[in-house]
Amino acid sequence: MRLAAKAAIGIIGGSGLYHMPGFEEQEEVKVETPFGDPSNSIVIGSLEGKQVAFLARHGRGHRLQPSELNFRANIYAMKSLGVERILSVSAVGSLKEEHKPLEFVIPDQFFDRTRGRISTFFGNGVVAHITFADPVCPQLSKVVERSCKTSGVVGKRGGTYLCMEGPAFSTRAESNVYRQWGMDVIGMTNLQEAKLAREAEICYVTLAMVTDYDCWHEAHEAVSVDEVIGNLLKNADNARLIVRDAIKNMPAERSCSCGSALQHAIITQKDQIPDEAKERLKLLIGKYV
């Protein structure tokens, strides 16, 4: 990776969004991280006059299932490229009547139903506890909400994204329980990204593309792959419009607290942090230790 390969905005494309048309002067970079390889090489280019890094979450050709994703490598790679804001685009099922297929939700909360996934950079000599009560960047959420309106797409800000393990979709019993809990949409990937982005002091927002009503809706059949893929393709076109507008209208300065998330989060005494850990996490904690 050449030092010139830098970008302040990152896009993580989920199911159906494997590339971002319109990149100018693009180049493909392979980023090495202390946590292994990202899902794919990262494409960097100019979009709407700004340097942007694009990563296909599941790899090109959709080769990686949710439980196989190296979330740490993906977020660390973005950080190493200079990314300060991540727009994450993901396919989800709706758990409420009001969130209709082909609409978008911009959740402000997450609920974890995964099992044993690694969702922190810390451990092995360094302990840190980030504040995560509000896991989504409020400034970035407002930008994306405005871009939905500008693009003529229904985009509702607020609600809870339930992150399940997968790869199978929910049973009907599970789906109904999640509805009783008040969850809004269900997906398989974004919670880990949000946690790691916060640890990396990167602003993060999810643009959740509703493909179906999961399996709870009596007027709809159980989720089928054909239905999901059909709606994915339609949603992906709208997502590209929204992302381009969001990048075009992205404020130059960050007005949130995401960029200082680790300031008071590192609990381990500086003189007790192993040299190996300091080196491994230098990109993240170097300015504090």
Image (cartoon, grey):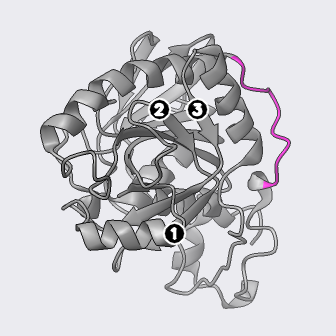
Residue type, mark 1 in image:
Phe
- Position of 197 with respect to 117 (left or right) is right
- The answer to which of marks 1 and 3 sits earlier in the sequence is 1
Check if mark 1's residue and mark 3's residue have beta carbons within 8 Å.
Answer: no
- In the rendered image of this protein, does residue 77 appear above or below residue 240? below
Residue pointed to by mark 2: 103
- In the rendered image of this protein, does residue 277 appear above or below residue 236? below
Residue pointed to by mark 3: 155
Which corner quadrant of the image does residue 23 belong to?
top left
Image quarter in which the N terminus is found? top left
- Position of 59 with respect to 147 (left or right) is left
Whether residue 83 is visible here, answered yes or no, is no
Mark 3 residue element:
strand
Q: Separation of disc 2 and disc 1 at Cα?
A: 21 Å
Residue type, mark 2 in image:
Glu
- Position of 147 with respect to 260 (left or right) is left
* Number of the front mark, 1 or 3: 3
Mark 2 residue element:
loop
Instruction: Name the outermost residue toward the front.
Output: 219
* Number of the front mark, 2 or 1: 2
Name the residue rendered at 29%, 30% in the picture: 231
Q: Which residues are magenta?
A: 249-257
Give me the disc on residue 53: none
Please tell me how crowded label 2 is: few (under 14), some (14-19), or many (20+) other residues with Cα within 10 Å: many
Whether residue 146 is visible here, answered yes or no, is yes
Please tell me how crowded label 3 is: few (under 14), some (14-19), or many (20+) other residues with Cα within 10 Å: many
